[in-house]
Amino acid sequence: MGPGDRTMQLPAALLLLWLPGCFSERDSVEVRSPGQVSGLAGGSLVLQCHYDKGWENYRKWWCRGALWLSCEILVTTTVSQRDKRVSIRDDHGARTITVTMENLRESDTDTYWCGIERSSDDLGAHVRVKVFPGKIPVMGTSTCVCVCM
């Protein structure tokens, strides 16, 4: 296909965007994350990702790795609710994925993804997690609750 062929296809593609009903609501769904969260080593953090209506009954997942296509899935909502120090919960009413990371380590600093599994490409949003060295108070643990609207 040459450059001329690509140019001829562009107006047709734009026309589809203007026609009502060409795309379902699910084609425009977004998963929203807090973007960046942080916590102290030894503590825990809780973060929430939100998703649009219509995806309540789909499997949700939490994975680790900067690259979307090669991130390592740590937990999902239908296979395992909890894996060692990480848990995931899906509140269908609030359309919220809640991830809890406990006993944080500095080595947990990385890029993670909240996602929704679907038959075509999964949907997701990245979250940058930063764990700082620090002392945890004797009277309890340090918890960061991060919410994105």
Image (cartoon, rainbow, N blue to C red):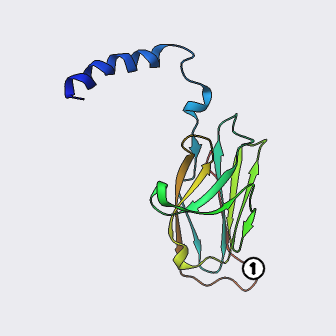
- Do we see residue 73 in this rendering? yes
Q: Position of residue 117 (x, y in %)?
A: 63, 47
Task: Tell me the residue that label 1 is attached to.
Answer: 140
**Residue at left offset 20%, top offset 28%:** 3
Q: Is residue 28 above or below residue 76?
A: above
**Residue at left offset 58%, top offset 35%:** 29
- Which residue occupies the foreground of this view, 35 or 19? 19
Mark 1: amino acid: Gly
In the image, taking residue 35 as reference, residue 10 lies left or right, namely left
Quarter of the image with the N terminus in it: top left
Quarter of the image with the C terminus in it: top right
Q: Across the whole image, how many numbered discs are drawn on residues?
A: 1
Q: Position of residue 88 (x, y in %)?
A: 71, 59
Outermost left residue? 3
Residue 76 in which image quadrant: bottom right
Label 1 crowding class (10 Å Cα cut-off): few <14, some 14-19, many 20+?
few
Q: Position of residue 55 (x, y in %)?
A: 69, 39
**Residue at left offset 48%, top offset 60%:** 70
- Which residue occupies the foreground of this view, 61 or 126? 61
- Do we see residue 132 in this rendering? no
- Which residue occupies the foreground of this view, 5 or 113? 5
Q: Is residue 40 above or below residue 51?
A: below
**Residue at left offset 45%, top offset 58%:** 67
Residue 52 in which image quadrant: top right
Q: Position of residue 121 (x, y in %)?
A: 54, 43
Q: Say what secondary structure mark 1 lies in.
A: loop
- Which residue occupies the foreground of this view, 66 or 49? 66
Q: Is residue 85 above or below residue 35?
A: below
